[in-house]
């Protein structure tokens, strides 16, 4: 399975974390939560996103999409701010047409929040960071969606 390298924002140490794992990643030095941002495609979406123990924010995007490029940094910041609470999985719909079909993506960016592989929130199109933050926080805090 592939890994990603993340620098801890608290102590500055570099950590290698698996794209798919149980729990949530923590810094090997200071033991604080690390942001979990990974890419996935048709072949590895299930173990990376659907089988994650954390809620997963899925960014379905395309390289040619201007709004996708403007939303991506905001999603990265949200994932860093919510380290240990959410996993950000980025899926290029042109390279992962099976995932795009499965979630019936008609526009990019399309954002999903998954819990235990089930969609609990969906948002199509770009939005300002504060709107995305509120949308994500509602999905993470909603008790009825935590039980789905």
Image (cartoon, helix red, strand yellow):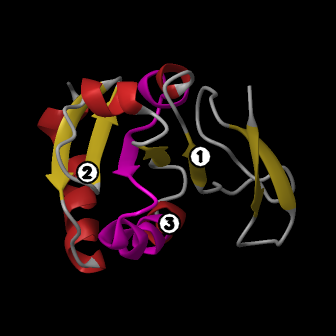
- Name the residue beneath numbered marker 3: 76
Along the horizontal axis of the image, is 74 left or right of 148?
Answer: right
Task: Name the spot of residue 68 as percent of width and height, x first.
Answer: 36, 65
Q: Nearer the viewer, mark 2 or mark 1?
A: 2
Along the horizontal axis of the image, is 135 left or right of 40?
Answer: left
54 magenta-colored: yes
> Dot 2, how many residues are within 10 Å of its Cα: few (below 14), some (14-19), or many (20+)?
many
- Name the residue beneath numbered marker 2: 110
Distance (Cα) linking label 3 and label 2: 15 Å
- Name the residue beneath numbered marker 1: 38
Which tag, 3 or 2, sits closer to the chain's start? 3
In depth, the one of 101 and 50 nearer the eye is: 101
Which tag, 1 or 3, sits closer to the chain's start? 1
| Quarter of image, res 19 | top right
Along the horizontal axis of the image, is 48 left or right of 58?
Answer: right
* Residue 72 in the image: above or below residue 89: below
- Specify the segment rendered in magenta: 48-76
Residue at horizontal 44 percent and vertical 67 percent from the top: 72
Q: Quadrant of the C terminus?
A: top left
Along the horizontal axis of the image, is 15 left or right of 98?
Answer: right
Q: Nearer the viewer, mark 3 or mark 2?
A: 2
Task: Name the spot of residue 27 as percent of width and height, x first.
Answer: 77, 53
Q: Quadrant of the N terminus?
A: top right
Distance (Cα) linking label 2 and label 1: 16 Å
Task: Name the spot of residue 42 as percent of width and height, x first.
Answer: 49, 25
| Quarter of image, res 112 | top left
Residue at horizontal 54 percent and vertical 29 percent from the top: 48
Residue 140 in view, yes or no: no
Q: Secondary structure at mark 1?
A: strand
Q: Which mark is residue 4?
A: none
> Dot 3, how many residues are within 10 Å of its Cα: few (below 14), some (14-19), or many (20+)?
some
């Amino acid at each position: 399975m592939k890994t990603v390298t993340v620098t801890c924002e608290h102590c500055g140490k570099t950590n290698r974390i698996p794209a798919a794992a149980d729990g949530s990643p923590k810094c090997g030095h200071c033991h604080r939560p690390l942001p979990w941002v990974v890419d996935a495609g048709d072949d590895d979406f299930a173990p990376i996103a659907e089988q994650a123990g954390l809620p997963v924010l899925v960014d379905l995007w395309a390289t040619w999409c201007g709004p996708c490029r403007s939303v991506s940094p905001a999603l990265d910041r949200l994932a860093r701010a919510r380290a240990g609470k959410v996993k950000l999985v980025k899926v290029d719909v042109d390279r992962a047409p099976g995932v795009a079909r499965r979630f019936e993506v008609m526009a990019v960016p399309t954002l999903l929040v998954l819990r235990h592989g089930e969609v609990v929130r969906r948002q199509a199109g770009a939005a300002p960071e504060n709107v995305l933050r509120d949308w994500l926080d509602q999905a993470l805090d909603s008790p009825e969606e935590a039980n789905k």
